[in-house]
Image (cartoon, rainbow, N blue to C red):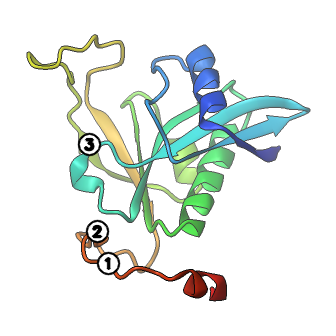
Amino acid sequence: MNLLPITIKAAKKHVAEHHRHHKPPVCGLFALAAQKDGKVVGVIIVGRPVARGLDDGYTAEITRCCTDGTKNACSFLYAAAWKAARALGYQRAVTYTLPEEGGASLRACGWREDGTARGGSWSCVSRPREDKHPLGEKVRWAVETHDYIKGRVVPTRNQPEIETKQIMLL
């Protein structure tokens, strides 16, 4: 199996055509594809955490993993996405599965169960939405670096400006 870069637009198209219970996410940070015998057999989309409480600036979320069932494609993509996220400076990644999905692909590449999310509808009176996804409880999975500090937030205000010279020296 080979790893390929893929645009988020192309990954979303693949998810729209092949995912069994979710539509494509609205956006993402980056996407990767798995290729076997010249054919894309799966994609993974990584974004910021949907849950505001997890969006600390150091955490990425796998928002979609979609394969055609090719053996080990999910594990291959989860491992590659975590490696890419770490290279970009993320120290933690999370994703969610339905309770009936066993999580073998995640366990195979070092992820652990990290609790549950109660699910439910995002629709409300002020912003009605059509629910076309499973609304039940979900299992949250996580993987993190050894130096991840829970509760730490990336500062967003009063950050010193990095001069171009400094960037070139890095």
Among numbered discs 2 and 3, the one appearing first in the sequence = 3
Residue hosting label 1: 159
Marks 2/3: CA–CA distance: 29 Å
**Which residue does the image show at 26% across and 42% down from the upper left?**
116
Nearest to the observer: residue 63 or residue 167: 167
Left or right of 128 in this view: 16: right
Q: Is residue 78 above or below residue 125?
A: below
Q: Is residue 135 above or below residue 92?
A: above
- Which circle's residue, 1 or 3, is located before the other in the chain? 3
- Which amino acid type is marked by label 2? Thr
Q: Position of residue 91 (x, y in %)?
A: 44, 68
| Residue type (three-letter) at the residue carrying disc 1 | Gln
Residue 1 image offset from top left, x and y in percent? 83, 43
Most distant residue in the right direction: 37
Q: Dot 2 surroundings within 10 Å: few (below 14), some, or many (20 or more)?
A: few
For disc 3, the marked residue is: 116
- Residue 128 lies, with reference to residue 78, above or below; the image says above
